[in-house]
Image (cartoon, rainbow, N blue to C red):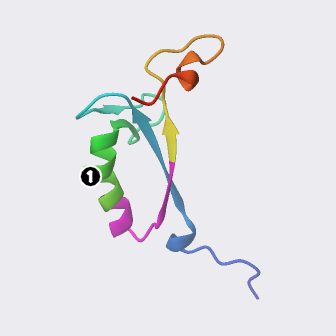
Amino acid sequence: MREHQLEVGDLIQPLFVVHGARIEREIASMPGVCHLSVDEALDREVDRVRGLGISAVLLFGLPAAKDEIGSENFASCS
């Protein structure tokens, strides 16, 4: 008897989003995984993931510049 059953619909696809447009840059430490600009994530990757039957994504936003206190987190949304 099985206690747990994992299905495609249970999965969450991580997306690594960066500033800019038309950016798709492979992450060296994670072959096959890319940093994507928002337009690339929406235009291409979300549709691909949905086509696989995965219904959820988790966004990891990467700042354009990093510092000791995470200043970009306090930037205005203009």
Location of residue 38 with respect to 8 vertically, above or below: above
Which corner quadrant holds the N terminus? bottom right
Location of residue 34 with respect to 55 vertically, above or below: above
Question: In the rendered view, does 29 fall on the left or right side of 50?
Answer: right
Q: Which residue is mark 1?
A: 44
Location of residue 69 with respect to 43 vertically, above or below: above
- Residue appearing at x 61%, y 18% in the figure: 70
Percent x, y of residue 13: 49, 55
Chain part drawn in magenta: 48-58
As drawn, the residue found furthest toward the top would be 68
Name the residue nearer the viewer: 58 or 52: 58
Question: In the rendered view, does 69 fall on the left or right side of 72?
Answer: right
Quadrant in the rendering for residue 37: top left
Percent x, y of residue 6: 61, 73
Which corner quadrant holds the C terminus? top left
Quadrant in the rendering for residue 11: bottom right
Percent x, y of residue 56: 49, 62
The magenta stretch spans residue 5: no
- Residue appearing at x 26%, y 52% in the figure: 44
Numbered label tally = 1
- Residue appearing at x 42%, y 31% in the figure: 27
Q: Residues within 10 Å of mark 1 (few under 14, many from 20)?
A: few
| Label 1 element class | helix
- Residue appearing at x 65%, y 78% in the figure: 5
Amino acid bearing label 1: Arg
Quadrant in the rendering for residue 38: top left
